[in-house]
Amino acid sequence: MSSTKKINRRQFIGSATTASLAFTIVPRHVIGGPDFVAPSDKLTLGYIGCGTQGMREMTSLIANPKIRIVAVCDPNKKSTDYVDWSPTGIRDGIRKALEDPTWGEAYNGIPGGRDIGQEFVEKYYAKDKTTQYKGCASYEDYRELLEKEKDIDALKIMTPDHLHATISIAAMKKGKHVVIHKPIANRMYETKLTIDTARKTGVSTHLLAWSKRSGNDVVKKWISDGAIGTLKEIHNWSYRPVWPQWTTNPQETPAIPKDFNWDLWLGPVPDRPYHPNYTHCVFRGWYDFGGGSIADMGHYSLWPLFLTLGINTPAISAEAYGTTTRQVIDHVSRNVVNDVAFPYSSIIRFKFAKQETLPAFDLFWYDGGMKPHTPEELEVDGKDLPQEGMMFVGDKGKILAGFRCDDPVLIPEARMKQYTEGKEKTGDTNERGDDVWIDAFKNKKQSPGSFLYASAISETINLGAVALRARKKVLYDSAKMEITNVPEANKFLRREYRKGWEL
């Protein structure tokens, strides 16, 4: 009886390479050019989530010669009902990558789903005639992908927030590196468990909100030099959300769309009827599925700042205020009690203990059009605060910057001129991009955006959601993962898990 031994992609590639060496040895750069990366040296990637943001980022990532997308996964097979910031942005990005101005012309709407992801990947790699392309696998369930695609190196996870921890932990336990969009999780327990799993498994991880920005370095220097005296407050404001924001769960129960696995999309969240107000790019406003505007944008602005300033411990308290609304029922105006979704706008004050290089300070977050009052230092110059921004308040002055701490200045203008006169201007150096995590994963090292460095920001942002839901100031003990002054608020640190999805 004969038997056939199964071999994985790398073994197949290696065998083919060995066989070819029997005939001749040709330098790689001669075969594929100076930027050529041999197939056996590429980072193989499973891509989880083929919605709008997933497809948008895929169009740029796929061009990186260091990676090869070998499998895609999404509980939605294919549809054109996605929500995006542009009616043709996704389609145009795919057309540009494929160099095909006609791609998607039959689609009436915004396309997404695993069939779209698979079609794009296969058409893109098929353009390269120098290699034999075997195709891209497609899966409805990430668990099946992890079971069958044993030789992949890493997962890129582009799902709604409520699935981040579940999929990341499953992947890391299989020894796969993980790159994920913010947040790590939308519950405190899941955040800490995910980071702990990364530490225990030793795989490489990367949170895509990481960046290195020169504005943060400038602010750090000015604070260290005493340009604003002792730091007292940091203010950060965003106009987000950019999705419809509801205050109650929908009551109607439309049919689940064909070829959409609602059960898999729900994942760990308790059963509820399907509704399009939950899915696609509008999920982030719901407590069950998202992390709100602060999880969406606060990671981008605050995490690089935390890393630069050395803010290594999460907030010790949070106090939050959100907009309210009323509805008229039987001619009576009644308060709408919103226990299901983030408010239209909010203000959150976090308190931080003394850090190694900073005194105790307050951090204020604003969204939904809220922002601080215009400081006197701007009024004397006849200016107002921008729509989005960041401000550092000391006992002897203020620094104003863009939302992500871009282009910081001392205010008023006379103070900036006085302070910088005769000093060399610091250059702008912003660093982010896929090579950061790809190179780390290939070398089995932690990226600068590793989960291991994201505890302080992740716990702080989750604490903000707890304060909004508790409607009281909450005191937080990170070591115990406990709200110490409002016992009933501890239920918001975890979620109620659907049977079979427990973590």
Image (tube, helix red, strand yellow):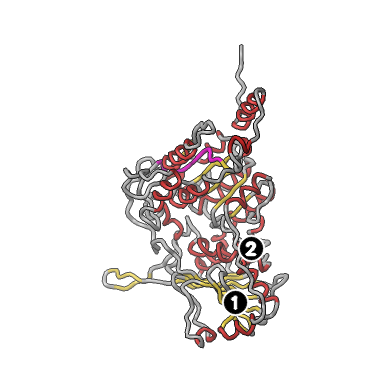
Q: Is residue 496 above or below residue 380?
A: above
Q: Which residue is mark 1?
A: 392
Amino acid type of the residue that numbered disc 1 sits on in the rendered structure: Phe
Q: Nearer the viewer, residue 364 or 330?
A: 364
Residue 192, percent from left and from top? 63, 56
Q: Nearer the viewer, residue 197 or 269?
A: 197
Q: Is residue 360 above or below residue 294?
A: below
How many labels were placed on the picture?
A: 2
Amino acid type of the residue that numbered disc 2 sits on in the rendered structure: Ala
Observer-side mark, 1 or 2, equals 1
Is 75 in the magenta? Answer: yes
Is any part of residue 183 visible from this angle? yes
Q: Nearer the viewer, residue 1 or 487?
A: 1
Q: Residue at x 46, y 71 (%)?
A: 322
Crowd around label 1: few <14 · some 14–19 · many ≥20 (10 Å):
many
Name the image quarter holding residue 410: bottom right
Q: Which residue is mark 2?
A: 456
> Which span of residues is magenta-colored?
68-77
Instruction: Tell me which secondary structure the magenta stretch mostly adopts.
Output: strand
The alpha-carbon separation of the residues under discs 1 and 2 comes to 19 Å
Q: Is residue 432 above or below residue 469?
A: above
